Image: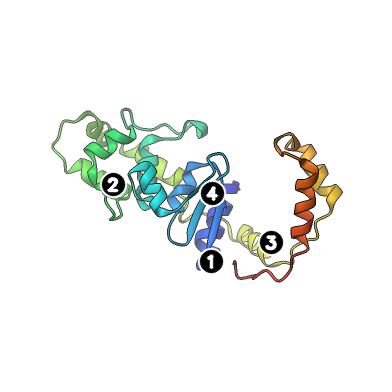
Amino acid sequence: MEADDVMAYISKQFLSESKIVLMSTDKDFLQLVDNRISVWSPTKKILYTPDKVKDEYGIPSKNLLTYRILDGDKSDNINGIRGAGLKTIIKHIPKIAEDDEFNAKDLLQFVNNSDSKIKLLENIKNSSNLIKRNYLLMQLSKVDIPNHTKRKITDSIRRDIPELVKYKLQTMIMKDKLHSNIQDFGSWVKEFLRLNHLKGLNRDGE
């Protein structure tokens, strides 16, 4: 089970009424952004809200998955459609930039009903199987997780927060070779320990 599936399940299906911030550099999470879910990029130092996604991509977050399906994801070896750059997509498929939802099904209907000879539309029309495959691989709104895994996730969220032990935390960070990326490592660990003593967190997700 991949971490992004677990994060998406918790955000969309388990804690479905909680205010949530996901921390990730993975652009796939931006498809989940709405008035309840935001995404913090630790590299860009940007908090992605619906307005921020629209400002940066020119596409509402609810339609970002459709763009990602066309664009593909080289890091995961997911091929996209030839010629499907962001500006070209918005130019020839303007519905994707509108506020109404424009999903993969709408995309295929749009290109199949078009008599335009624009190369991008022709490429999409001839790649319907790729579009469907990419949707199944990249969508995070309704991830398919086995029931026994859901129970493990539920138990992890509902159980008491384990006590943070300084030497165990330091050992894990050193083992994963993360310490060199943390400025003033000693002060950072001390702050974590201080926060660990704060109690009374709302178990419903706040």
Q: Nearer the viewer, residue 126 or 80?
A: 80
- Three-letter code, disc 2: Ala
Mark 2–mark 3 CB contact (< 8 Å): no
Q: Earlier in the sequence, mark 1 or mark 4?
A: 1
| Residue picked out by circle 2 | 97
- Residue 122, position as x, y percentages in the image: 22, 32
| Residue picked out by circle 4 | 40
The residues tagged by marks 4 and 3 sit, at their Cα atoms, a distance apart of 23 Å
Q: Secondary structure at mark 2?
A: helix
- Three-letter code, disc 3: Ser
Q: Give the number of the disc on residue 156.
A: 3
Q: Identify which residue is drawn at 45% across, 48% down.
A: 30
Q: Would you say 4 lies left or right of 93 here? A: right
Q: Give the number of the disc on residue 18.
A: 1
Q: Identify which residue is drawn at 69% across, 61% down.
A: 156
- Label 3 Cα crowd, 10 Å radius (few <14 / some 14-19 / many 20+): few
**Residue at the left extreme of this rendering:** 115
- Three-letter code, disc 1: Ser
Q: Identify which residue is drawn at 64% across, 60% down.
A: 153
- Residue 124, position as x, y percentages in the image: 28, 35
